[in-house]
Amino acid sequence: MKKYRILINGKDFTLKGENKKYGFYTTRYIEGHSEDEATKKALNLIREELKDKVVKNPAENQPEMFVEEIVELESFEDALVPGTGFTWHPQK
């Protein structure tokens, strides 16, 4: 399988205890047969991480996630696979 580094940009997330929207950036290191497969795996992984932890959006106002960059790697070297954490920022 091929190895990928995928940068994800999230928008319009409502965090628990907050009344304003936040966005985030996060990177995941994923193996897949193609870019499309790796992207789907990364997005599903992030959805699972956020589902019960920090996100609380109403059904009519769902957040969005976009792939900002995907790079095929020869190896994961010293990367923490698949990666964790989010860099959150308030939206205007």
Image: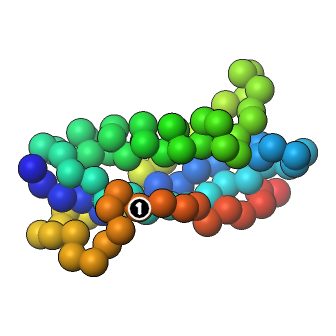
Q: Quadrant of residue 86?
A: bottom right
**x, y (%) of residue 81?**
32, 62
Query: Going 58% across and 50% down the picture, which residue do you hit?
Result: 10
Query: Going 49% across and 45% down the picture, which residue do you hit?
Result: 46
Query: Going 41% across and 61% down the picture, which residue do you hit?
Result: 83
Q: Nearer the viewer, residue 45 or 89?
A: 45
Instruction: Classify the position of the C terminus by image quarter.
Output: bottom right
Residue 83 to residue 64: above or below: below
Give the side of residue 74 with respect to residue 68, left or right: left
Q: Nearer the viewer, residue 44 or 34?
A: 44
**Residue type highlighted by circle 1:** Gly
The residue furthest top is: 59
**x, y (%) of residue 12?**
70, 44
**x, y (%) of residue 16?**
81, 44
How many discs appear? 1
Give the side of residue 76 with respect to residue 59, left or right: left
- Label 1 Cα neighbours within 10 Å, binned few <14 / some 14-19 / many ≥20: some
Name the residue beneath numbered marker 1: 83
Q: Is residue 85 visible?
A: yes
Q: Which secondary structure lies at badge 1?
A: loop
